[in-house]
Amino acid sequence: MKEPDPRSEAELMAERQRRFEEDLIDAYDEELEMEVDDRILDGPDGFTAEYRESRKHYFRELFRLQGELVKLQDWIVHTGHRLVVIFEGRDAAGKGGAIKRITQRLNPRVCRVAALPAPNNRERTQWYFQRYVSHLPAGGEMVLFDRSWYNRAGVERVMNFCTDDEYEEFFRSVPEFEKMLVRSGVQILKYWFSITDEEQEIRFQNRIHDPLKQWKLSPMDLESRRRWEAYTQAKEVMLQRSHIPEAPWWVVQAVDKKRARLNCIHHLLSQVPYHEIEHPQIELPSRVYHEDYSRQPVPQAMIVPETY
């Protein structure tokens, strides 16, 4: 039986509002916590009045754009739209950070991230695009590829993981593959995150000296640093040979991480003809109480110690 609450209706409403605001702030703190890395990178400049004002503007715009992403998600579900967004760029270019901000407020059942590992022995004998096809969206889904089939035009080419014939076959096939997807109703957006030689070195040095980020550095990343010019040439060829009207490339200037995130999200939203979907007013049903129900206590041995 529910015990009566001795507090007045006004007190209950005030408490409910306080709890609501705390929950809202906690959700925003998730983003604020991720900004610690940027503050460290920015050094003393991160504490100037100008920087603080710029940071406020960044958060205002990010939260506004994330609200629009929720509307986009609703529209995708409502219309059965299928959206593929490809993120390519050098190591440490900021692809993962942008993807994280896009997915942060979205339903993972609607917006999925595909980050495929290196192909295994069986996958190496398949049609090259085969392992990517299973990750394509069904109706009412969007899939973000954190690297994609363009691995063949980038890392595989530079590191000699594919033959010249396989490389040329990729460029013969990829326009037709993407045209086929578009004809089938799949929208494809392709982003290349562009950073300078100097900026990549700074970000790599940060990963080397930050124990929370060292896991991000692989031997392949370090080798990619040495082969900067080879990656540049491969990128130039890729953009030239796979930039098609049905699925064009878009270059995101990514030296400034925050601007890159905002610009990418803003552009993504501009490429989809979404609109706000009206939803019926939600009313929370009253909790049902039964006089014959008695809640059983949880054994103390099962309780997680409250260390904090």
Image (cartoon, rainbow, N blue to C red):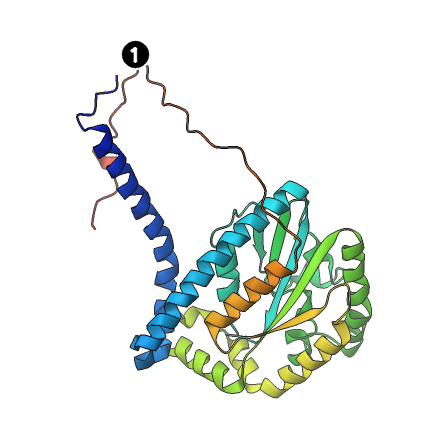
131 left or right of 280?
right
x and y, in percent, of residue 5 in the image: 20, 25
Query: Based on the displayed image, in which of its 4 quarters is residue 189 positioned?
Result: bottom right
x and y, in percent, of residue 211 in the image: 35, 71
Residue hosting label 1:
292
Residue at (55% x, 76% y) in the render: 220
Question: Would you call the spot at circle 1 few (<14 residues within 10 Å), some (14-19), or many (20 or more)?
Answer: few
Given the image, on which type of amino acid does mark 1 rest?
Asp
x and y, in percent, of residue 57 in the image: 41, 67
Helix, strand or loop under label 1: loop
**Which quarter of the figure is the N terminus placed in?**
top left
Residue at (74% x, 78% y) in the render: 240
Extreme residue toward the front, this view: 10
Q: Is residue 158 above or below residue 290?
A: below
- Numbered disc total: 1
Which residue occupies the foreground of this view, 129 or 193? 193
Residue 63 visible (yes or no): yes
Residue at (33% x, 71% y) in the render: 52
x and y, in percent, of residue 276 in the image: 58, 46
Extreme residue toward the top, this view: 292
Q: Is residue 222 above or below residue 211?
A: below
Extreme residue toward the left, this view: 6
Q: Is residue 135 above or below residue 53?
A: above
